[in-house]
Amino acid sequence: MSWTDKQSIRVINYLKGKFNVKTFIETGTHVGVNAQLHSQNFKKVLTCEKIKEYFDKAKDRCKEEKNVFIYKQDSVEFLKKFREEPMPIFYLDAHFYEKGMKDKTNEEKFVVIRELKALKGKEDCIIIIHDFDNNLGHITYDGQPLDLELIKKDLMAVNPNLKLYTNELSSCDIKRLEEAEDWEEFINLRYTWSKPEKTYRGILYAVPKEINIKGLKRI
């Protein structure tokens, strides 16, 4: 959901230029707002959504964007298709908790763990994880937050030399209600602004080399 955070968009565009990224690969299309936004900046946007309602809305929203390719597919299998893309940005935002998961393992609850396993050894890439626990809004399932302790082993198995950065509250630049372009975006923004923990979301940036950009903290 980087489209609501202008600072996140600036960081993504910085990374695109810094590492000469041509392809933006997203898990969790939702209704396609993020994919449509990033289609303006990348040569190719690949994204997946397994929920038919959202998939159909995303297809309709992005029908004029010839460089956006939407797949109705599980995110883990989707990522395996594009391991060979040279230096892509992988934007992992497919978090979804199903009923009956309480007694399951963290790997079963958090799709991001399985996504990272699917990318193991893919050293030439950038990974961005939305809803990350850095003391801003984040995903928590059954008391377990989506934090570095949860994912570090599998993240570093992608590339042991990854440099990790997160956003900070002072750098968040959130899109406001009056900037909504249509009703559907307005609904999303109304949800976003309902509580601070929904408004300011944690983001983890994992990059193959050190970077220097205002608003990010090295961890």
Image: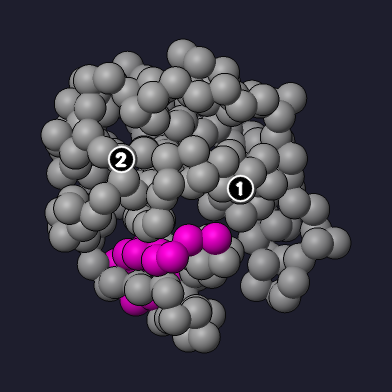
Question: Quadrant of the rendered structure where residue 186 is?
Answer: bottom right
Residue type marked 2: Cys
Provide the residue designation for mark 1. 9
In magenta stretch: residue 204: no
Q: Nearer the viewer, mark 1 or mark 2?
A: 2
Q: Is residue 41 above or below residue 102?
A: below
Residue type marked 1: Ile
Q: Is residue 24 above or below residue 13?
A: below
Q: Earlier in the sequence, mark 1 or mark 2?
A: 1
Asked which secondary structure carries label 2, the reply is loop
Circle 2 crowding by C-alpha within 10 Å: few under 14, some 14–19, many from 20? many
Question: Quadrant of the rendered structure where residue 154 is?
Answer: top left
Q: Position of residue 118 (x, y in %)?
A: 15, 44
Circle 1 crowding by C-alpha within 10 Å: few under 14, some 14–19, many from 20? some
Res 172 seen here: yes
Q: Position of residue 113 (x, y in %)?
A: 24, 36
In the image, what residue occupies the spot 55% across and 60% down? 41
In the image, which residues are magenta? 41-55
Could you say which disc has been placed on residue 216 in the image?
A: none
The Cα atoms of the two marked residues, 1 and 2, are separated by 18 Å
Q: How many marks?
A: 2
Q: Residue furthest right?
A: 178
Provide the residue designation for mark 2. 125
In the image, what residue occupies the spot 41% across and 49% down? 21
